[in-house]
Image (cartoon, rainbow, N blue to C red):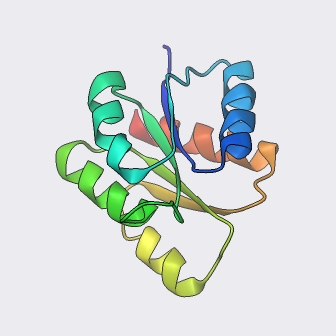
Amino acid sequence: MDRKILIVEDEGVVALEMQEFLEGQGYIVPSTVTSADKVMPEVMTHQPHLIIMDINLKSFIDGIDTAERVSLIKKIPIIFVTAYPSEKIKERALRIEESRYLVKPVKKEELLRQVKISLSEKN
């Protein structure tokens, strides 16, 4: 089964590295998104099985608020990533159903492990 992953990351190099790594592992990354306002149209178009979501987006809302909006329409597992870890942010992020939390820089092995766990829980 082809698994689609939407990457929401406002740092282009980080998004490209994640995309290339995940595609090399056999996943489909139909799109990378740089801002919160572009997430919903991409979710509706591509119907991803998983979203990797940066928390600190250069948008009017952050990645956690974006994930909450997505969850109102569709239940999609989310892996949050952030370069600015704090317990308060982590607690807020993990309130989202089927979510995980990683701190940047994310090691490829850990990203892959969390992707596999998130996708296996969905089945």
Q: Does 119 appear above or below 9? A: above
State how many labels appear. 0
Instruction: Give the quarter of the figure containing the C terminus.
Output: top left
- Residue 12 left/right relative to 46: right
Q: Position of residue 53 (x, y in %)?
A: 51, 52
Measuring from the top left, give residue 49's x and y in whole percent: 42, 32
Residue at (70% x, 34% y) in the render: 16
- Image position, residue 114 (x, y; %): 63, 47
Q: Which quadrant of the figure has residue 101? A: bottom right
* Residue at screen point 46% across, 38% down: 50
Quick one: 84 or 49, which is closer to the camera? 84
Residue at 36% x, 42% y is 38
Residue at 70% x, 37% y: name it: 18
Q: Quadrant of residue 112?
A: top right
Q: Could you tell me residue 9's position as x and y percent?
A: 57, 48
Q: Is residue 73 left or right of residue 107?
A: left
Image quadrant in which you'd find residue 87:
bottom right
The residue sitting at the left extreme is: 73
